[in-house]
Image (cartoon, rainbow, N blue to C red):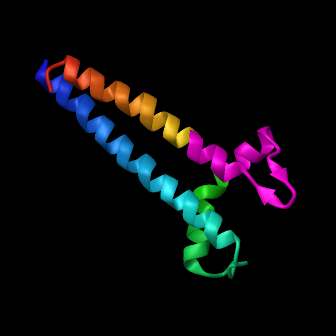
Amino acid sequence: MFVLGNLFAALAYIIHKVLWLYMWIIIIRAVISWVNPDPYNLIVRILYSVTDPVLLAIRRRLPLYFGGIDFSPIVVIVAIMFLQQFLVATLYGLARHFGH
């Protein structure tokens, strides 16, 4: 059963790191949007291609654009924080239960 515990611990660790990285990518995207970036810059294009699918889905479902401020990155960050507290913690709990 310790193998299953190790599997859950590894999954929790990987998911935690991926969520943490994506949260920082969202933050960087929000900060860059304040300075009117060059749309042909490779880094800007990568940031937009990684974040646009999630942000556009949030914008379609919840129109969170008030007074020229887009609140969809905040919703994504809150969702990431929820996933870290619920999903990652649950996986770590399962890992402890199965003997990690």
Quadrant showing the N terminus: top left
Residue 13 is drawn in which quadrant? top left
Q: Position of residue 84 (x, y in %)?
A: 43, 37
**Identity of the residue drawn at 20% across and 23% down:** 96
- For the record, the magenta segment spans 55-78
At which x and y percent is residue 98? 18, 18
Q: Nearer the viewer, residue 32 or 48?
A: 32
**Which quadrant does the C terminus fall into?**
top left
The residue shown at (87%, 57%) is: 67
Name the residue at 66% across, 81% down.
40
The picture quadrant where one finds residue 92 is top left
| Lateral position of residue 54 relative to residue 7, left or right | right
Q: Left or right? Give the position of 22 relative to 1.
A: right
The quarter of the displayed image where residue 29 is located: bottom right
Q: Does the magenta segment cover residue 58? A: yes
- 16 relative position to 78: left or right: left
Q: Is residue 55 above or below residue 12?
A: below
Q: Give how far across and how far down residue 88 sits, in percent.
A: 37, 33
Q: How many marks?
A: 0
Q: Is residue 46 above or below residue 41?
A: above
Question: Above or below — where is 69 with respect to 88?
Answer: below
Residue 4: x, y in percent?
20, 23
Camera-side residue of 37 and 65: 65
Is-magenta flag for residue 74? yes
Please tell me which residue is depicted at 77% across the width and 47% down the height of the picture: 59
